Amino acid sequence: MLIISAVTSLKSKVAKLLTNPIVASRAIVLFLVATATMFGNSTGVLPPIPDVNLPILYGLARWDSSYYLGIATGGYAIFQHGYSFRPIFPLIIRFVYPIFFWLDVRSAEVVAGFLWNLVALSIAAVYLERLTRLLLGPTIASRGLLLLAVYPSTFFFSVIYSEATCILFIATSLYYLESRRILLAGGLGFLAGLARPEAFLVAIPFLVKTLFEDQKLRKLTAGLVVLASVPAFASYGYLQTGNLFAVLQSEITGPKCNILCFISNPVFNLANYFLPYTINFAVFTIAVIFIVYPLLRANTSSRIFPYYLWAFILLAIVFYSGDARSLARFALVVPPVFWAQAEYSLNHPRFFQALVVVYAVMMCLATILFVNWYPML
């Protein structure tokens, strides 16, 4: 009876996981990647990296994928701007890709990165649901997950980028923060900071909560641990280069078109990258509107407020200094963006339906653009 009960419980958990919108949407993303790879048209731009030897699925490795794959095997020294990329995801690829020994190295790396992203995203989806249920209830949890599943840049959770790794550590960190396992939450937040450059800002909820909640010393300590990911990686850069500011200089001088660059030459930029800019600015505008609303209203609880504040600060920073073609991607790993939209939709069901449809259409288009070497970064 115990064995039957255990098997039944396992089947139930697997079925629940597979029907989680974020996990289920991977089949759609993979279909789009494969179809766009087989039937898409090249932009005529010389690809930054050659296609890997993976029939149908070589579209998983595009643009910045070359940095993650190269760092995994050759380290940071082989790239001029390599220190703009954090080490956790390349390290995971480095440890996993030898399993696929029958493939060439680059193809094995892509398979390793793709499978790790699937595992990381599956775990993150479970924790995101638990976290949102804990804070906002089951209805907002289910709606938030669906919005994230069809979000225009959701394909970055599957391709060779670090977003799946980042959302895993952010979701688990915030869940354990709310579950009062604060030091564990701080350690996971530290790992998030080693997955994406802007992820160290997840320290903001830890630090703000010291003002409103108990266990102030633990939350302050955990927040400082999260922030420590910045000097930790800077120290690594110093050991490798002898330059304490190697990481900062790499991020500042890396090739990108921020909002100031875009404003200085909008005609040229729109003429060359119309669709990526349109998708990013439309999605980013929606995100900002719905993040500002709970910050201004009087009935936002002190428990939720720090998360919206974190989201607003992060979006403000990346709008000013981040690549204008990547705005939708920056918001991808910030759960409050989707909480706010899901919460508003409780009293506006037609808005929710329309947003899901609009997001899904833009997601399909953005995935096709990315696979065909358009700069949907």
Image (cartoon, rainbow, N blue to C red):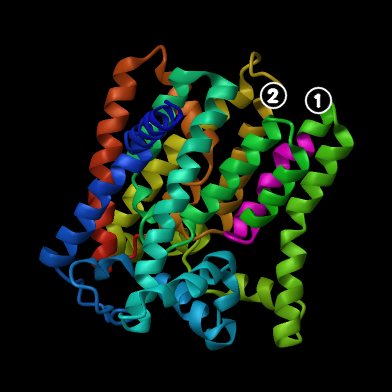
**Cβ–Cβ below 8 Å for labels 1 and 2?**
yes
Task: Residue 301 in the image: state x and y as whole percent.
Answer: 67, 18
- Report the front residue among 268 and 175: 175
- Report the front residue among 332 and 43: 332
Q: What whole-number distance in Å separates the C-alpha atoms at marks 1 and 2?
A: 8 Å
Q: Residue furthest right?
A: 217
In this view, 274 is above or below 305: below
In the image, which residues are magenta? 193-208
Which of the marked residues, 1 or 2, is nearer the chain's N terminus?
1
Query: Is residue 205 covered in magenta?
Result: yes
Q: Residue furthest left?
A: 39
Three-letter amino acid code at the position of disc 2: Arg
Residue at mark 2 = 303
Task: Residue 352 in the image: state x and y as whole percent.
Answer: 33, 23
Residue at mark 1 = 212
Q: Is residue 101 visible?
A: yes
- Which corner quadrant holds the C terminus? bottom left
Which structural element holds mark 2? Answer: loop
Quadrant position of residue 221: top right
325 left or right of 193 in image: left
Task: Residue 42 in the image: state x and y as whole percent.
Answer: 18, 72
Q: Main secondary structure of the magenta part?
A: helix
